[in-house]
Image (tube, rainbow, N blue to C red):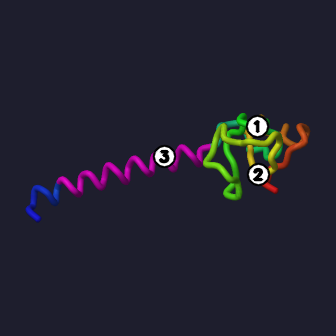
Amino acid sequence: MNQQALVHAAIAGLFALASSGAALAQVKAEPKGMEKCFGVAMASKNDCGSNASAHACAGQSKVDKDSKDFKYVKTGTCTQMGGTLKPA
């Protein structure tokens, strides 16, 4: 492998690493003043699901109020809506 090809491969690797890190940061960021509320989202209106869900993420829930899917709600309102702060 020549030196130019090695440099190109290294640069491509850095770009791939940077973009995957940005994607992870977006997944972990929780909106300010909001909390995850499990068991309140209607079918296809969820913001995401727990690791136990049968789908990838937002908008893919098939069941109303699935205890494994969450929706972001204002902090302090989850239990008033009948939800929980942790997946079942």
x, y percent for residue 33? 72, 36
x, y percent for residue 62? 74, 42
The mark lying in front, picked from 3 and 1, is: 1
Say which amino acid is labelled 3.
Answer: Ala
Q: Is residue 35 magenta?
A: no
Q: Residues within 10 Å of mark 3 (few under 14, many from 20)?
A: few
Q: CA distance from mark 2 to mark 1?
A: 12 Å
Q: Are marks 3 and 1 in contact (CB under 8 Å)?
A: no
Q: Which residue is mark 2?
A: 68
The mark lying in front, picked from 2 and 1, is: 1
Query: Could you tell me what secondary structure mostly forms the magenta stretch?
Result: helix
Question: What residue do we see at 10% from left, 56% from top?
Answer: 4
Question: What residue do we see at 68% from left, 53% from top?
Answer: 54
Q: Which mark is residue 58?
A: none
The mark lying in front, picked from 3 and 2, is: 2
Quadrant in the picture for residue 34: top right
Say which amino acid is labelled 2.
Answer: Lys
Q: Which residues are magenta?
A: 8-29
Question: What residue do we see at 68% from left, 39% from top?
Answer: 47
